[in-house]
Each structure stands twice: as C-alpha cells, then as structure tokens.
Image (tube, coloured by chain):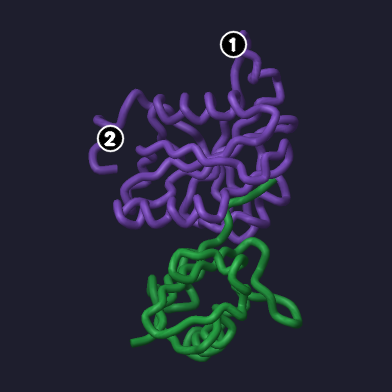
Amino acid sequence: MAIELRVPTILRTYTKGEKAVSGAGGTLAELFDDLEARNPGLKERIVEGEPEELRRFVNVYVNDEDVRFTGGLKTGVKDGDVVVVLPAVAGG
Amino acid sequence: MLIIDSAGYDAIVAHARRDHPDEACGVVAGPAGSDRPERFIPMLNAAMSPTFYEFDSGDLLRLYKEMDDRDEEPVVIYHSHTATEAYPSRTDINLAQEPGAHYVLVSTRDGADSPSYDGPVEFRSYRIIDGAVTEEDVKIVPDYSNLGDN
C-alpha cells in the first residue's frame, strides 16, 4: 500500500506522463518531499514560499476533502489515501 | 481552430448575458482526444465578481471526477469580460493551466446583458500555453454529424 497522487495534465511533464504516482509520508508535506525525489520539479509547482505553503491557485484534496480546510500541508495522510491535485480554473 | 456547435455557442453567450455584470464561467467537455465540445457545463463563479472568476474548489473536484469517469476533457473553458474586450487579461494568462483547452472569451461590455440587445456579442477563442496567447478562428456548425471522427 502507498498513497496515490493524481496528477493534472499540466504537471505530467514532471511524472514522465503518468496520471498517478505513489509515495509515502505522514503528512502532505512529507508526501510531496518523497514524490519530489522521483519526480523532480513537481513539488515546486504545488507549494511555494518559506515556510512552505500551498500555491494559491492549486487545489489539493485528500480523499475528496479540500486540504485548505484540514491543515494545508500539515494534513495527515496514510496508506490507501488518494490525493488529487487540480489547478484552479480562474482568471480576471 | 475551435469548431463548436450552435447549441454550445448559444449556451455560452446566454450564460454570459445572464450573469452580467459579474463574470460568467464554465466548461464545454468532450470525449478525450476528440477536440469536440459536446457537453455544456455552466459553473458558479465563486468570486462573484465583475473582474475575476474562479470555480469553487468543491465544484472543481466534482467536475474533474465526472469528466474522468466519462473519459472526457475540458475542450472549452469559457468566461466573460463584462467591461472590457474579449481578450485574455494578464490574470487570465498567468492562471491558464489547461494547455489542451480552447479558452473562450465573451464580452458583454456593449450592453448584451439587456434582453432587448440584438447586436453582435464578441466571442473569441485562444490557446494559452506557458504564458503565450494565440488567437484562433471560431467556426460554428449546426451539429457535429458531418465532421467524421473529429
């Protein structure tokens, strides 16, 4: 078992075209660090700043729950969870 | 070039006119790889603003899961400008994150929100990839029956 991350089209250049990748970690931050090791460049498109935060126009869901309401990058994850990343559809 | 049927075209324009002065937004989904916008899906503008639009995050997840289940993709992503021309703003360009989509812009600045308005409504389509905007022709067809598989 592992944690599955569903990758949006625009970020598949960092996952060799894969629609989903697997990783490990106790929190979202740890999961993104783990995934970054095998998918260089992916994390930077999802998080930014110091301390790291989710990018404003990227939505992340753990088991269909928007993580902005569950602690952001500190949101706990476990084996079997499904993490979905979706760029916001937005503009001016 | 964007090829869209008149039903889809009319639905986008009607949505833009209805939501004026706020920006209207939505998607026309189609079978993955077909480049054929078939299923009109108006979305709520969570920003409820005349100068900004954003899909609600819960709506966005439901939309993408539904398209995934149906093997669809967002062929058209549309929104309206209510005081300016139908050309992507700097914000539109910075936030465009669907390189495969036709970004459709409609402008209601000429009074198209009025029920009595019967003039033309600006309807233009673009590719927006890595910050580069390319306008494309729009062809409106009665339906897709004569276009073969594409």
Of labels 2 and 1, earlier in sequence is 1
Q: Which residue is denoted by mark 2 in the rendering?
A: B147
Between A2 and B117, the residue placed more toward the observer is A2
In the rendered image, residue B131, in percent from the top left (x then y), is placed at: 65, 58
Q: Which residue is denoted by mark 1 in the rendering?
A: B118
Between B98 and B50, the residue placed more toward the observer is B50
Which color has been applied to chain A in this rendered view?
green
Picture quarter containing residue A79? bottom left
Q: Residue at x 50, y 70 (%)?
A: A11
Q: Amino acid at mark 2?
A: Leu
Q: Secondary structure at mark 2?
A: loop
Q: Amino acid at mark 1?
A: Asp
Please report, as a chain letter, where disc 2 is located: B
Q: Residue at x 59, y 18 (%)?
A: B120
- Separation of marks 2 and 1 at Cα, in angstroms: 30 Å
Q: Residue at x 58, y 57 (%)?
A: A88
Q: Secondary structure at mark 1?
A: loop
Q: Residue at x 59, y 29 (%)?
A: B16
Lateral position of residue B146 relative to residue B30, left or right: left
Instruction: Tell us which disc is closer to us: 2 or 1.
Output: 1
Residue A51 vertical position relative to residue B2 in the rendered view, above or below: below
Res B100 label: none
In the rendered image, residue B38, in percent from the top left (x then y), is placed at: 35, 38
